[in-house]
Image (cartoon, rainbow, N blue to C red):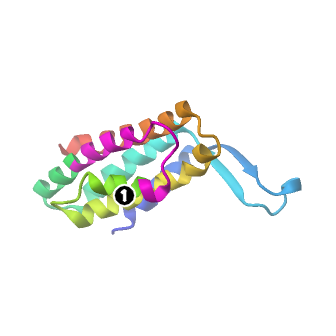
Amino acid sequence: MKTIPLLLALIGLTALGPVACNTTSPGGGGGVANVLVSPFAVQAAASLATSSALGFNIKNSAERKMVAADCEAASAAIRSMTAGTPPTVAQFRATIHQFGGNDVPLPYEILAGSLSSLYASFYPSIQANPDVAKITAYLEALASGVEAGSAPYL
């Protein structure tokens, strides 16, 4: 049951599809694929992951509301990371943890793990080309998705 949010996020990314796929090996054979996803796909997956984590993992409505409030704080934290170079996946996860999970740690940990995995899916793209507008677009999409997924539970 705890892996459902991550699985749904990955399904969401797959269903919304990549916008490009480049191989890193010369000649295109047998290389490691670098799949780029759109900010729209990131927003949809973040919304799905957040909503699923809140809906499936938390049965107590009071706890669900506390974690949803933590999600709102986390989205503000995500937006604060848009200046300069993109944070590493570890820095992203650490920042998310600073803004929630004190009252209901396990469900928030599951959600933070899902969001960190989602961030890791597009991190290579923004790291390779640290354009401020691109970083902002992806992190804004992630933050907006978290807000959209938690809004029904507030």
Q: Main secondary structure of the magenta part?
A: helix
The residue identified by callout 1 is 94
User: Image point 33% across, 51% down: which residue?
Assistant: 50
Residue 130's quadrant in the figure? Answer: top right
Q: Quadrant of residue 9?
A: bottom left
Classed neighbour count for the residue bearing mark 1: other residues with Cα under 10 Å, few (<14), some (14–19), many (≥20): few
Q: Is residue 11 visible?
A: no
Q: Is residue 77 magenta?
A: yes
Above-or-below relation of 47 to 7: above
Query: Which residue is situated farthest in the right direction here?
Result: 27
- Amino acid tagged 1: Ala
> Which image quarter is the C terminus in?
top left
Task: Tell how many labels.
Answer: 1
Is 19 on the left-hand or right-hand side of 141?
right
Q: Tell whether 130 sits left or right of 55.
A: right
Q: Position of residue 126 (x, y in %)?
A: 58, 43
Is residue 129 magenta-colored?
A: no
Point 42% across, 60% down: residue = 6
User: How far from the left and from the top, in percent, is residue 43?
Assistant: 44, 40
The picture quadrant where one finds residue 26 is: bottom right
Could you say where residue 4 lies in the image, as x and y percent from the top left? 38, 63
Residue nearer the viewer, 55 or 63: 63
Span highlighted in magenta in the image = 70-91
- Judged left or right of residue 22, residue 90 is left
Against 53, residue 79 (above or below) is above
Residue at the image point whose x is 55% and y is 44% from the top: 16
Q: Quarter holding the N terminus?
A: bottom left
Residue 104 in percent (x, y) is at 18, 62
State the SS at label 1: helix
- Of residue 81 and residue 4, the one placed in the foreground of this image is 81
Q: Furthest-top residue in view?
A: 133
Q: Is residue 26 visible?
A: yes
